[in-house]
Amino acid sequence: MSGVRDGLADGDLTVSVGGTTIVATDEVLAQAQFLNVLRDDLADWVGRAYRIRNLDPYWPANWLGQDPWPDLLQVAGRLNSLHEYCGVTADNLVAAARSYGYVERVAREAALMGAADLAYGLGRLLRGGVFALAGTPFGVSMAGAASVGRIGLHGSLRSPSRSPAARNGADELDPRLLTNPNVVALVRAAASSLDDVAWGLAGTPRSVGRAFGDEGLGVIGISRTALGVLAVARNGGVFRESPVSVAAVGTPTQPTPPTGVGDLAERIPKAVAGKPQVRIENYGDAEHPSWAVYISGTVEWDAIAKTDPLDLTSNITAMAGQTAGSFETVISAMKAAGIAPSDPVVLAGHSQGGLIATQVAAYSWFNVQAVATFGAPESKVPVPDGVATLTVEHTDDIVPAMGGDSLTDSDDRVTVRREAFASEPLPAGAALPAHNLDTYRETALLIDASPEANLQGFRDTVTDVLGSEAGEAVLWRGSRVPERPAPQ
């Protein structure tokens, strides 16, 4: 497993549950958990002290009322006081974390509302100008979204692994800018507000956006914007989906089941052209099988789909909530591997692979029990209730911010955030170092080292599903199948 860079500490993580109930560093929650354990131990020692006093056969009959063990009685009293103090302190720590979570949620709601109002005002200013389209409000939405999409193709949506030396200096973006947490937060707010620009362009009443947009029911948002990009761009010959085929590659191996989040991140295939994009592990026996599925990130970043289905076309299609080539690849590989509808499954994915993992979890055909995503723009995907979900994001990673913000997280979703390069210098030649899979693997190791209860619960779920006996791992590669030209 990849080593952890110097300077990382357990307290670097921030953990939230459901996006609303609790937000705190894992160190605070771990201290609360430690105090609760200590409180239970103290209660046990208090009981032992009293039992030892009761062992004296003469003490109950001592008519003078003198205690033959005054020191032991004093110790028991102090232990009992410490027991109560630990409980109160632990409760106060958790209450403070919940209060912080409430304040953070109010701040997020205010920021989302403010950004939406600003975006709507911008749309109103542009109404009737060069950005307007004739037709329905939905048509206007598509035009505004496509404009933003075309801008993105020449900037931050370029391959994060491509070195600066290989790029044209005219469109080069400073990695320090793209890895700035404030810029990432701004991008998240902007992504959530693109639909509000379109509604402003269309002249739709602001109340509609507030009721149905990201700041309301979430019916209209980044997915509608991505739909607009697709509708316009496909007329121009880009972002066109095609059928896919999958095949097992290489020789099967016999791994042991993953025991933590670090193992899940370590087994995700790296996004390399021509290499497998999916790894499927089978555990248990023929009567009671269980499975782990790992999905790589985006491999090709060209707007025109070529051979690899984990490409930019699938990125946009998946964010629009449509059937992407990458989704078809994973579903086809899972079925070809023999995963039955009743078999329990654990999913893990990086970047686009994480987005697809959540969509597979929402796909009713499979019995998904747990999902772990790393740096994925998947905050809008509604994972079904009962599916343990771990979302890992770096606050200096711009990619998950492109999925916008969500205020309707399930209580089954645990989100872990960390600034990957808070004190570390950025590595040379990496455009988005905080998005690299290796960087997320480092964060996964910190998650495994954390005693925070929700993180332990997720690890226990994975272990319960996959067991402890060795299984079989097979790599799968998907390819786009060129569509035959229509007969003349």
Image (cartoon, rainbow, N blue to C red):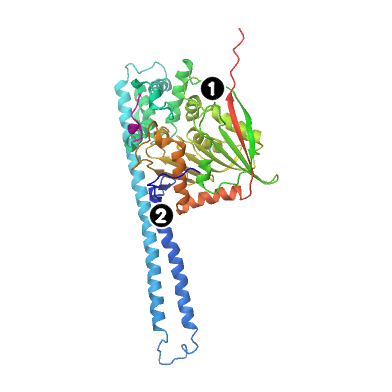
Residue found 63% across the figure and 33% down from its top: 250
Give the percent coordinates (x, y) of residue 164: 38, 26
> Where does label 1 land, which residue?
241
Magenta highlight on residue 316: no
Foreground pick, 64 / 261: 261
The answer to whether any part of residue 407 appears in the image is: no
Residue bounds of the magenta highlight: 172-179
Mark 1, residues whose alpha carbon is within 10 Å: few (<14), some, or many (≥20)? many
Foreground pick, 153 / 81: 153
Assign a secondary structure to mark 1.
Answer: loop
Residue found 46% across the figure and 82% down from its top: 53
Image-based side of 124 in relation to 284, left or right: left
Label 2 sits on what residue type?
Answer: Leu
Label of residue 29 in the image: 2
Label 1 sits on what residue type?
Answer: Glu
Considering every residue shown, the one lying at the far top of the view is 488
